[in-house]
Image: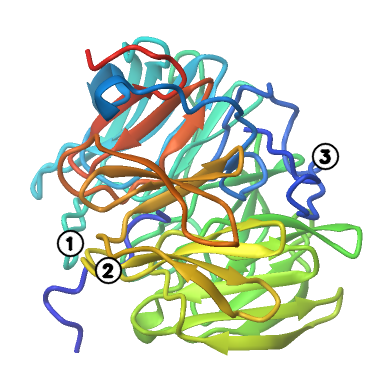
Amino acid sequence: MRRIDDPGPPPNVGGMTRSSFYGLAVVTAIYSSPVSAADWPRFRGTDGTGLSAESGWLGNWPGGQPRSIWKASVGAGFSSMSLVEGRLFTLGHNGLKDGGIDSVVALEASSGKELWRHSYPEKLADHYYEGGTSGTPTVDSGRVYTLSKAGTALCLEASSGKVLWSRNLVSELGLKIPEWGFAGAPHIAGDRVVYNAGDAGLALDKATGKEAWTSGKGSAGYGTPVPFSLEGKPALAVFGLRHVIVVDPVSGHEFWRHPWKTRYDVNAADPVVIGDTMILTSGYGTGACGIRFTGSGAQELWKNQALRSHMQAPIGIRGHIYGIDGDGGDANARLKCLEATTGKVVWESPKAETGVLTAADDKLIWVTGKGELIIVKADPTGYHEVVRAQVARGKVWSTPVLLNGRLYIRNWKGELLCLDVKGTGGVS
């Protein structure tokens, strides 16, 4: 029986990165349409690594505090943000158990002004936690793709919010809803939009919503499909209920799968790929493992309990992974650095409350579960803290986004902050 205070796995808590610089093997042409270098079109960026190409962004913070540019209210939940062509897209819930409504929200990135909002009925789904939205919008070729907890898949016009097509994966296709609802973000692969739904993923035609390929109707995991190169071929790592499954994004053909059983079947933190090594990690005491893969299978290199990332995926940089060891709400969590090929812990941070992670310019951006922003050098020689500041209130489980010198942070109540981390102004 699950604990009543069990936080569950709500969010998959979701720009062009210098993949070659970080040693990541990624084939991008088939995954998405060309986007600006100043875009962040999906959860954890274009290639799903959580790495931003930003540089020179940590300015002088007078009083030790980054300047607040704007604040907005987008509704309850744990969705992250996507930013394309000056617009920010996210999901929020009205917070009501009766008469619950989800909304896809578009804001002007420069000011926080609401541009449009598309709403539809959706339960709060506060199953052992606050509830609200989990997935993150994905933007491609002037369209916004979303997936709700209950399986509503939408394609909206990015400029207006007009519904171009809508499918319900449960009532129309017979897919089973995971215990905490669908949580992964849609992923664009050529003319397909791929979801972590069903046994090992589902793809629809991105223009029409018509089924392209399916993989069974069972319950899915909670991660977002992660693109990577499999012996020169485009592939997606789909974190399923009890396996990581590697598939062809165009046909759905399964290349191989590797077992990964987690307590309560909570596989939520996206897999991380560094060269020919894939890192899997989950919470509830499960731990992490490194597997070396080929086009036909994978072999386990190591397995330990040194990194137990409940929801936030680690980040891979030059042969090392940086991740948060702790379940959601864990006040004794730590940020850790591990060798990717051995699992050896190189260093760990002082204790803090779990939180979320992204990275840029050899620096880690860690926002703790209580809204403290901590900048740490991505340096395997030791834990080197650059600066920290209290920036948000309440629980923060939504992965932050850094773009154009601005850091976007959101708490579970839907308070969205835009902070200047490049300028030298004080607190506004």
- For the point 31% across and 47% down, which residue is it? 78
Asked whether disc 3 touches disc 2, contact meaning CB atoms under 8 Å apart, the reply is no
Helix, strand or loop under label 2: loop
Q: Which residue is mark 1?
A: 129
Q: Which residue is mark 3?
A: 29
Helix, strand or loop under label 3: loop
Q: CA distance from mark 1 to mark 2?
A: 7 Å
Q: CA distance from mark 1 to mark 3?
A: 39 Å
Of the residues shown, which amino acid type is indicated by label 1?
Answer: Tyr
Q: Is residue 127 visible?
A: yes
Of the residues shown, which amino acid type is indicated by label 3?
Answer: Ala
Q: CA distance from mark 3 to mark 2?
A: 35 Å
Q: Nearer the viewer, residue 79 or 421?
A: 421
Asked whether disc 1 touches disc 2, contact meaning CB atoms under 8 Å apart, the reply is yes
**Residue 226: quarter of image:** bottom right
Location of the C terminus by quadrant is: top left
